[in-house]
Amino acid sequence: TWTTTSVVEEQVAAIRAQVGSKRAICGLSGGVDSAVAAALVQKAIGDQLTCVYVDHGLMRKGETEQVEKDFVAATGVQLKVVDAAERFLNALKGVSDPEQKRKIIGREFIRVFEQAQAELVAEAGAEGEEVAFLVQGTLYPDIVESGGGTGTANIKSHHNVGGLPDDIEFELVEPLRQLFKDEVRMVGSELGLPDEIVHRQPFPGPGLGIRIVGEVTKDRLDLLREADAIAREELTAAGLDREIWQCPVVLLADVRSVGVQGDGRTYGHPIVLRPVSSEDAMTADWTRMPYEALARISTRITNEVADVNRVVLDVTSKPPGTIEWE
Ligand code: XMP
């Protein structure tokens, strides 16, 4: 019978057998799958694993710290954090088109990750060790979607980052390839990962970059991070985290509307709340969430976030709307 304990034991043994005394690398995205895969491999081979986390500056408030502190505290993993925020901002300068943004973010991500990977391989080489394995958080549905193959030849184009290069010389370690998402979460809990990581709602790889309608700038990111943090705090306080699949908070940076605050007229930006209910993100409906929670989010965002004078609710299902605005 299936138990999380037996899955962990089985996978730990399999990973040890596969990797032996060589070294492995794992890219962390902040998402559940890569975190659980890394934690499993860490349990199996300890310091032979190094994780790489690329901070593209498009994360939500506290998320990078969650990886840097909470994940490391829970697993004891060796982590290399690459702060690439400047680089991503520069590459995104002047770009408003959603597809352009996605392409740029995906491309820069791969470049930064490959560079970090090359540095680790070189460092290990200098110590006479070989880095031969790349850990991936591939799940069973990912394999089914990509045609059911095994081994290095059939990697699903990395959903989070837009595709790993074809010519990787690593052998893959995919300890989650027989599991579904809910099972991955159970394994994560069994491994002692915090709930904030294990029950994290879906968040797109391009991050807040595709939740700013208009050009992505540092100021706009800071503004959106504040608004998003308030919405998340209030949704959690209202006990809605499990009912809501995810709630994108979107900044309409190119739109302004007139408002009034104190004695003065304002001319600020709207923030869109997009709470959705879904089974698999393929289709979704807008969540009929309590007005009280909406009211609190709206009041707090307009009071606490400068330059935002209006909060609007997206009441569109998917289709015809997508979950994200870009
Ligand atoms: P849409 O907007 O297409 O989103 O209805 C469906 C689900 O996918 C997430 N999403 C992404 N996830 N990289 C990701 O890892 C991406 O580029 C990306 N774009 C959308 C979205 O948050 C939703 O859960």
Image (cartoon, rainbow, N blue to C red):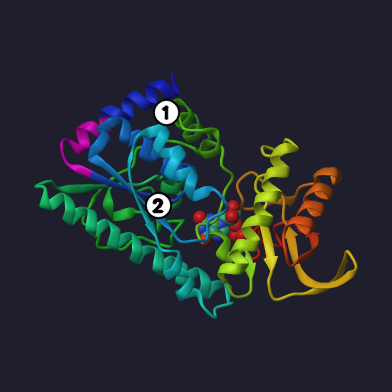
- Viewer-proximal residue, 83 or 208? 83
Q: Is residue 83 above or below residue 244?
A: below
- Viewer-proximal residue, 31 or 177? 31
User: Do residues under tags 1 and 2 come within 8 Å of each other at their CB atoms?
Assistant: no
Looking at the image, which residue is at 61% across and 51% down? 281
- Viewer-proximal residue, 66 or 208? 66
Looking at the image, which residue is at 79% across and 59% down? 302
Looking at the image, which residue is at 74% across and 75% down? 255
Identify the main secondary structure in magenta: helix
Looking at the image, which residue is at 48% across and 37% down? 180
Magenta residues (range): 14-23
Q: Position of residue 12 (x, y in %)?
A: 30, 29
Taking the image as shown, residue 234 lies to the left or right of residue 108, namely right
What secondary structure is marked by label 2?
Answer: loop
Q: Is residue 74 magenta?
A: no
Residue 139 showing in the rendered view: no
Q: Amino acid at mark 2?
A: Gly
Q: Residues within 10 Å of mark 2 (few under 14, many from 20)?
A: few
Specify the farthest residue to the left: 128
Residue at the spot of label 2: 147
Taking the image as shown, residue 139 lies to the left or right of residue 52, namely right
Q: Position of residue 148 (x, y in %)?
A: 38, 47
Q: Residues within 10 Å of mark 1 (few under 14, many from 20)?
A: some
Q: Position of residue 303 (x, y in %)?
A: 79, 56
Q: Quadrant of the C terminus?
A: bottom right
